[in-house]
Image (cartoon, rainbow, N blue to C red):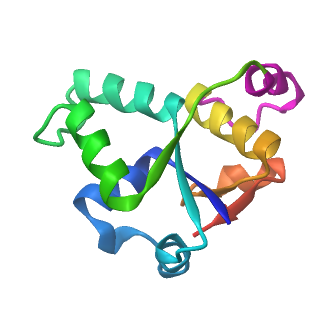
Amino acid sequence: MNLLLHSHVFVWLRQEPHRIGVMAISEMMLTSSRLFLSSATLWELQIKINLGKFDFGDPLSIVIADEFRANSIELLQIENKHIFNLSNLPLHHRDPFDRMLISQALVEDMTVVTVDPKFSEYGTKVLW
């Protein structure tokens, strides 16, 4: 299964893995599952770090490299097809980063690992 990690899941994976849902962490640990982090999430995390909303203790570039290596996470780049698909999404969710994750998940047929209930309003596969 291809799993797209929401920003809070990535943060919790690094700092508080016990907060991730049992079903989600179980699926994430399967060798058959591929974990992805969107470049939109990198952007969101860097903005939140710059605003002082949280701190990893290390620069984001180091955290990303460490977590990608330790958990075999792959980067999902934003492509034009993801951007153009945004026009098909109703405005259930106004957060632009979450809307991009929803669009990417729908276009790439991925399951989003998130606690956010609004994702399922788009027909997105959600795991928690």
Within the magenta stretch, is there residue 1? no
Asked if 9 appears above or below 89 in the picture, the reply is: below
Q: Quadrant of residue 82?
A: top right
Quick one: 88 or 74, which is closer to the camera? Answer: 74
Span colored in magenta: 81-95
Residue 117 point in image, percent of width and height: 65, 57
In the shown orientation, is residue 105 left or right of residue 49? right
When the figure is inspected, residue 54 is found, relative to residue 52, above or below; the finding is below
Picture coordinates of residue 58, whole percent (x, y): 13, 37
Q: Residue at x 77, y 53 (%)?
A: 124
Image coordinates of residue 13 in percent, x first then y, are: 34, 60
Quadrant of res 34: bottom right
Q: Residue at x 43, y 25 (%)?
A: 43
The quadrant the C terminus occupies is bottom right
All told, the count of numbered labels is 0
**Relative vertical location of residue 60 with respect to residue 115 in this rendering, above or below:** above
Taking the view exactly as shown, the residue that stands out farthest to the left is 57
- Residue located at (69% from left, 23% from top): 79
Compared to residue 70, the image places residue 23 above or below, namely: below
Residue 51 in the image: state x and y as whole percent.
25, 22
105 horizontally vs 66: left or right:
right
Q: Is residue 94 magenta?
A: yes
Determine the residue positioned at 47% across, 75% down. Answer: 29
Please identify the quadrant where the N terminus is shown: bottom right
